[in-house]
Amino acid sequence: MRDATRPLPFGPAARAVFDLSLDGMVFSRRSLLMALLVAAPVGFAILYRVLAATHGTPPLGPADLYALLVAVYWVRNVLPLAALFYATSLVADEVEGRTLTYLLTRPLTRASIIAGKFAAYLATTFTLALPAAVVSFFVLMTAPAAPPLGSAAADLPRDLGVMLLALVAYGAFFALLGVLLKRPVIPGLLFLYGWELLANLPGYLPRLTLTAWLRSLIRHRPAEEGIAGLFQQVLPGDQALVVLLGVSLALLLAACWIFSKREYVLDQ
Amino acid sequence: MNRSRWVLILALTVVVVGVVAGAGAIWWSSARAAVGPLAGEALILPKDARFVMGFDVKRFTASPFYAKFAKERGMKPEALQQLEDKTGLDPTRDIDQIVVAGAGPGRKGSPGLAVAFGRFDLYRLGRAIETQGKALGTTHEGVTLYSFADAEPRALAVGFLDESSLVFGAKDEVLAAISSRTRNETPLKTNTALMALVEKVRPGSTFWIVGDQSLLASLPTSLPAPGASADGAATMSLPALTGLTVTGDLDPQVSLAIIGEAKDALAAKNLADVVRGLVAMASLQAQQKPELQQLASAISVATEENRVLVNARFPYELLEALQPKAKPAIAAK
């Protein structure tokens, strides 16, 4: 029989929180909005095929469009935004809904709560983003002007891996922001569209951003204009993998630690 | 199992099916037996080649580039018609791909050996060559061979490998290629440095070329600095390249991807800075020629460890704008 005076072990506790959180995250208004945003490229790809069939080959080739979708649309913009809106609310939603008390009074460690909720966030965003990438890839790469599918297909697993890594890295950062700040969305947006622009500067500054490391892991290099085009750096791939995984783990541990130490006083 | 689990499993299934389908496409691709975009049959080319280039004739003739510039650039459709009348060969219809391997500049008399893939009427081609009386027809290891200017030390020859492939170049190299094919050897594959570069070329490009260190050693190592005098007193030194890969496409726009491999990351950075400087100089010229502004913004330069990546995309409208305009006729006084 389990000792009721001690909390549940980390694994079962995190799994219980994951089960509880997943339903609430997948079937929510936030997910509906995010699904539209994340899966929009499927619509773009179908529209591209229709336009190519009715009006001739558009100026942008299907491989170039897919490269833009992966490198600019998903990895640079939409996945970080999805991470911002989901990961900052892992705890904030419970605080706002005044339901945090119910979680904290259960025999669960606080680290297992963060871990379970983070896993639910990853599962939800995975469900929204990765199938959209797969469908967009096949819709575009089977277009008449596309390169042979056999040569392009090698990029697909890599792209899916980088998208997943983007969700992990940005998710860990925004989870930390969510437990640190009461209103994390504005600082999160400033991080995404202020700090992350350092990735386009010369020198060592791009190494201080997540986007430069993520960008280095994908093979697509859409031509960019201005400073970004001139100074774009591609960092070593093996280092990028180590840095992103290391930073994500450190940020998640920091989020768990802060959440464990912090006292929450709920408004009455 | 609750409904969110079902959604998760459905998403996972889509991803797994997609990845498996992609792996299947790679497995069944015609490039399976080849090295990168290089067809397996082209591996009979010489092992001491310092460059290999491929040209996809089908993609070229289907591109807007061909449609726009074929007549202007002296493609001489009437000459092609004459060729077809004499030999039954219409290059735009019958040739799929041409692969050339050679030593490049520096080795005298070796322009390179080419293999052409397509559909060839060997009887009509042979008759056309024989009736001109300029070539001597023989066979070598069962393959029909026509050699031109046989008395010359570097006679040229064409070998009819089969209905789908021809080999053309210096006679001794053509003979060696035919012998390699008969013995089922792949000499070019033993050139590991060059094959490593070829493997990185994306199949499906309209044209591509790779060159190894020995070829690039003959390139100039310095450029005249801006404002330098004609005697070249002030120069910018260029870091040496150890490998070069160029791939290009013509549809829907002219796009070039150049990857230069330098000795180390510092040399790559220096080389990238030189390229950026040239792009910036082109931008400065924009006041005189506004189309150069577009040209400069169409080029991006990046570095990746010891590699310099230059991507360029030129819409056809831009290329047309860069064409020299016909001078208006001067009115007679």
Image (tube, coloured by chain):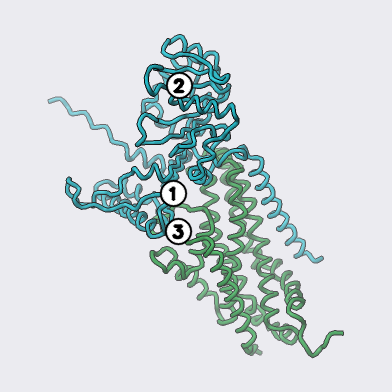
Chain colours: A green, B cyan
In the rendered structure, the answer to whether residue B207 lies left or right of residue A163 reads left
Residue B160 x, y percent position in the rendering: 53, 21
In this rendering, the answer to whether A143 lies above or below A7 is above
User: Is residue A60 visible from the viewing direction of this image?
Assistant: no
Label 2: which secondary element: strand
Q: Which residue is mark 3?
A: B305
Asked where in the image residue A103 lies, by quadrant, the reply is bottom right
The residue lying at 42 percent from left, 17 percent from top is: B148
Report the number of numbered marks.
3
Residue B5 x, y percent position in the rendering: 76, 64
Question: How far apart in space, not on screen, are marks 3 and 1 (Cα)?
Answer: 12 Å
Residue A243 x, y percent position in the rendering: 54, 68
Q: Quadrant of the C terminus of chain B?
A: top left
Give whichever of B292, B305 is nearer the camera. Answer: B305
Q: Amino acid at mark 2?
A: Ala
> Do discs 3 and 2 share a chain?
yes
Label 1: which secondary element: strand
Tag shown at residue B259 = 1
Residue B122 x, y percent position in the rendering: 55, 17
Q: Amino acid at mark 1?
A: Ile
